[in-house]
Amino acid sequence: MRHLLALFFVTLSTACAACDFKQQELVGTYLYASGDSKFEAFELNDERQFSSWLHNRLASSGTWRVEDCHLIIAETGLSERKVKVIAISEERLSVEFSGLENSADFTRVQ
């Protein structure tokens, strides 16, 4: 009985945990500012399309979604990237890319 009760509370706390951001808040165009990044510039649009640029040229594209409070980027032809959103505001986005040591900061330009 104790095990069932403990499982219930773990499930309840997991289900009630909310992200610190709304999916729609991620929509925008971002430029690299500092830290460890996989991208120089990227866009997340409201149709859940993803695009990234390197040296002002399209580098990759695909789709994006939020899952378990992480940004999931599915680039065409590549494995999905799981990105932890640390902080978001109207001007900045701070994230941690899986496999990189330090977080990265981006400036929102649109």
Image: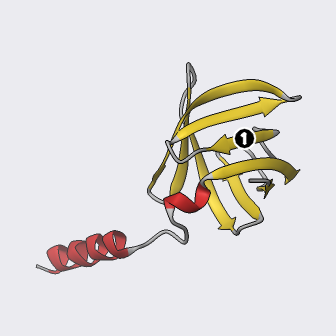
Q: Is residue 47 left or right of residue 1?
A: right
Q: Is residue 21 visible?
A: yes
Determine whether, in the image, residue 109 is placed left or right of residue 97. right
User: Picture coordinates of residue 64 (x, y %)?
Assistant: 52, 41
Instruction: Residue 41: give x, y in percent of width and height.
Output: 79, 40
Q: Residue at x 51, y 65 (%)?
A: 22
Q: At 15% from the left edge and 74% from the top edge, which residue is drawn?
A: 4
Query: Can the viewer see residue 99 in this picture?
Result: no
**Image position, residue 28 (x, y; %):** 67, 52
The local secondary structure at tag 1 comes to strand
Q: Quadrant of the N terminus?
A: bottom left
- The residue identified by callout 1 is 42
**Is 46 placed above or below 54 here?**
below
Q: Residue furthest top?
A: 77
Residue 82, picture quadrant = top right
Residue placed furthest toward the left: 1
Between residues 15 and 23, which one lies in front from this camera angle?
A: 23
Q: Is residue 36 left or right of residue 14?
A: right
Residue at point 76%, 49% (across, down): 30
Residue type at numbered disc 1:
Phe
Residue 65 versus residue 59 in the image, above or below: below
Q: How many marks?
A: 1
Q: Residue at x 55, y 50 (%)?
A: 71
In the image, is 79 to the left or to the right of 88? left
Rendered position, 31 above or below 16 = above
Q: Residues within 10 Å of mark 1 (few under 14, many from 20)?
A: many
Residue 90 locus on image (x, y percent)? 71, 67
Of residues 110 and 2, the one nearer the viewer is 110
